[in-house]
């Protein structure tokens, strides 16, 4: 039986990121062999990940990376905000975002891509990190935008580190104009998108089901007025116009200058940029949106813990 020294434990811990006692146990199980112990820990980590995979992960980080005319964003979830402040978790999200930019934001290709500096895929690396950090984690979604001429501006709201935060936005602007000034107006619009969460870029791209549902609600409301059908139709048309102004990006009032719509603000910016500007697309990820979070009953949890002792 090999002697398990503090140096061996440290070497294995540095190699795997596992806890000290886990490293000691792995070395004891594998007669001090570093490689075999590393594989043993990896297997154990995957087993831990499988056990934790049913737990709700609605915290974490949105990661954004921008490279001039191309940018990507990802959402990687964890169970607690505490983990989002872990340096290893943050480094992992940055690497995942960088890889997303390389695969044009495609989720399946990102999951299967090689995790930089590792022999594992992105999906495998995240699963192993579950065992290392001790919380369920998941790559939830990814996206990317690019333009041939112009910029893809980005903005991270509630940032806790460079390119990492609670809300990430990308805005793609096509133009032959000054890149620096284009980037500036693009970031302002990205900040606007973070604040207003528009449903679509323009009226034509708005989900037809959303439009139909809104109109149906407005029709029922208008009928309560008791007015004739032709008046009701005009009332509904007016209210739908207001609805489009509220949810369509180009029609929204610019939060930085409410006297202008986004469309008009871009038109005015063309003078300083020195060329026409076309807003072609945007992406907005808000951490945990749409995830049903479990309501914790702390008193019941404590009672259960006491009862199990």
Image: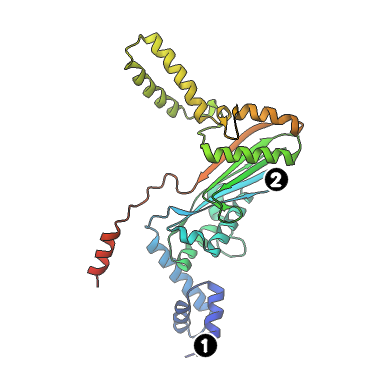
- Of the pair 210 and 225, the residue shown nearer to us: 225
Q: Position of residue 40 (x, y in %)?
A: 47, 75
Q: Where is residue 267 in the image (x, y as percent from the top left)?
A: 68, 27
> Which numbered tag is attached to residue 129?
none
The reply, left or right, for residue 151 in relation to residue 218 is right
Count of numbered circles in the view:
2
Residue occupying image coordinates x 70% and y 31%: 269
Residue 161 in sight here: yes
Residue occupying image coordinates x 50% and y 87%: 4
Position of residue 246 relative to residue 168, above or below, is: above
Tag 1 and tag 2, C-beta contact below 8 Å: no
Quadrant position of residue 298: bottom left
Residue occupying image coordinates x 60% and y 47%: 72
Question: Mark 2 highlights which residue?
Answer: 68
- Image quadrant holding the C terminus, namely bottom left
- Distance (Cα) linking label 1 and label 2: 50 Å
In the structure shown, which secondary structural element does the residue marked by tag 2 occupy?
loop
Tell me if mark 2 has few (under 14), some (14-19) or many (20+) residues whose alpha carbon lies within 10 angstroms of its own: some
Question: Mark 1 highlights which residue?
Answer: 5
Tell me if mark 1 has few (under 14), some (14-19) or many (20+) residues whose alpha carbon lies within 10 angstroms of its own: few
Residue 148 in sight here: no
Position of residue 264 relative to residue 17, above or below, is: above
Residue occupying image coordinates x 57% and y 55%: 96
- Of the pair 20 and 271, the residue shown nearer to us: 271
The reply, left or right, for residue 287 in relation to residue 148 is left
Colour convention of the picture: rainbow
Quadrant position of residue 172: top right
In the structure shown, which secondary structural element does the residue marked by tag 1 occupy?
loop
């Amino acid at each position: 039986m090999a002697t398990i020294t503090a140096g061996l434990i440290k070497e294995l811990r540095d190699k795997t990121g596992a806890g000290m006692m886990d490293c000691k146990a792995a070395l004891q199980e594998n007669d001090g062999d570093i490689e075999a112990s590393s594989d043993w820990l990896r297997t154990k980590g995957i087993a831990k990940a499988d056990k934790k995979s049913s737990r709700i992960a609605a915290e974490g980080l949105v990661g954004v990376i921008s490279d001039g005319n191309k940018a990507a964003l990802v959402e990687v979830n964890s169970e607690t905000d505490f983990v989002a402040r872990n340096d290893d978790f943050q480094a992992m999200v940055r690497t995942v975002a960088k890889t997303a930019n390389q695969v044009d934001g495609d989720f399946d290709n990102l999951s299967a891509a090689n995790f930089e500096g590792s022999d594992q895929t992105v999906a495998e690396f995240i699963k192993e990190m579950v065992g290392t950090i001790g919380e369920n984690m998941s790559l939830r979604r990814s996206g990317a935008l690019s333009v041939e001429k112009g910029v893809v501006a980005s903005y991270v709201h509630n940032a806790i580190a460079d390119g990492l935060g609670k809300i990430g936005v990308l805005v793609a602007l096509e133009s032959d104009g000054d890149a620096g000034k284009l980037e500036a107006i693009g970031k302002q619009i990205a900040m606007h998108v973070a604040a207003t969460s528009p449903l679509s870029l323009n009226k034509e791209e708005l989900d037809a089901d959303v439009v139909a549902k809104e109109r149906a609600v407005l029709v029922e409301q208008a009928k309560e007025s008791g007015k004739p059908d032709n008046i009701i139709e005009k009332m509904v048309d007016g209210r739908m116009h207001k609805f489009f102004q509220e949810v369509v990006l180009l029609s929204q009032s610019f939060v930085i200058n409410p006297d202008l719509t986004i469309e008009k603000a871009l038109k005015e910016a063309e003078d300083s940029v020195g060329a026409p500007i076309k807003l072609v697309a945007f992406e907005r990820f808000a951490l945990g949106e749409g995830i049903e979070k479990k309501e914790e009953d702390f008193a019941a949890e404590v009672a259960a813990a006491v009862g199990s002792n």
